[in-house]
Amino acid sequence: MKTIKQVILKCTILLLGLCSFTNFFAQDVEVTATEQLNQKVDALDETVKKLQKFKVSGYIQAQYQWGEQAALLKVGNINENMGESFSRIGIRRGRIKFVYEEKIVSGVFQLDVTEKGVGIKDAYLQIKDPWFGTSALKMGVFDRPFGYEISYSSSRRESPERSAIFQMLFPEERDLGAALTLQAAKTSPWNFLKLEAGLFAGNGIKQETDSRKDFIGHLSAQKDITDNVKIGGGISYYNGGVFQGNKYVYTMDGNAFVVDSNADNKGKFAKREYFGVDAQLSFMTSLGMTQLRGEYLFGTQPGGPLSSKSPNTSILILTNTYIRNFNGGYVIFVQDLGKLPFSAVLKYDWYDPNTKVSGDEIGLNGTNHVDLSQNTFGFGLLWKVNNNLRVQGYYEMNRNETTQNLPKFAGDLKDDAFTLRVQYKF
């Protein structure tokens, strides 16, 4: 009997021990599973934090354009029949932008993807000051810090293209270089002032080919006068050079080009100097937001015999150098139509590549069609469908200076153009 009791007691103790061990083991497994879950949550949280540092944005501009026979449209090829008006359809801009930001450092890549191919628009790193975050150093390919319209995004601009003078002096808008932005803290009374200045290769989005650097600087101010009124303005300066491919350098003497053929001219740099003034005003009334902006530029532009456009290339062109004094600018007026999602746009811009001659003086004494001035009056309507989608209709009346010494330009060219654009921004 005692033996049976002892066996039962031993079995009971064994079962109790087994249960305790099982319960202990279960608790240990439960703790391990919880820890594993916490680890997964921490890893997921870390991944989310990294993704928050990485941003992707962009926009697509699909457009239809119609032009008179001599028009230069921005999509499609040139007119196949110069005796008639023509039309084109295409992707004007297809931008995708990648930004990764970690603390005070950020890296930016922006591509332009259209039916013409894929090209780089931006590729730079930026280091902000660790104290206020208002000053920064930027290095790579980015917008030239000159004036207002260059850095005004194409996704926001109320006219389809930048003004003619910027297209001539700053093709591609961007350049390879390094620039410093200086601005006081947001709490400072001097925060309304901003200085941007840097050194650039002068070749646009191309590789650098010489040791010379161009200087570009822009000092601007923006101020809120009241809750409904804002003003801004700035001054800009560009000092650079253009390689002289041979010894023949032409400058203006009165209304004629004269040549300097000194052998030492070859390989030197012709001075490229621009001055600019810009101003902005916006205010809110019962009619909606009203905006008025303008810029005026003047200076010295080295070019070739067939174009005054900046030689935005890494190839040293072996051609004669023509140095011209220029001026130009634009004025744009934008009026929101009350509470409707529409804005009316009026814009006038002009570019005079050679201020030393005009009218029938052109075509004589070494001057030609390159020295003719041009101006454009444009008007249009913007429909902001929602925050991402907008539609733009815009008509440009292009006028060129005339001269009886150049038969093609004895009258105004037929080069008006109409643009219908649909833009989606993401």
Image (spheres, rainbow, N blue to C red):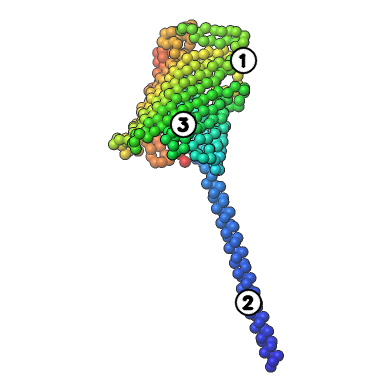
Q: Amino acid at mark 1?
A: Gly
Q: Are marks 1 and 2 in contact (CB under 8 Å)?
A: no
**Along the line of sight, the residue nearer the viewer: 69 or 41:** 41
Q: Residue at x 68, y 84 (%)?
A: 10
Which residue is at 46% across, 7% downward? 254
Dot 3 or dot 2: first in sequence order is 2
Q: Is residue 201 above or below residue 112?
A: above
Quickly name the residue at label 2.
19
Task: Point out the tag, 1 or 2, that comes first from the N-terminus.
Answer: 2
Q: In which quadrant of the rendered view does residue 123 lie?
A: top right
Q: As shown in the figure, which amino acid type bears the numbered disc 2?
A: Cys
Q: Residues within 10 Å of mark 2 (few under 14, many from 20)?
A: few
Q: Which mark is residue 267?
A: 1
Q: Residue furthest left?
A: 286
Q: Look at label 3 and name its amino acid.
A: Lys
Q: Nearer the viewer, residue 363 or 38?
A: 38
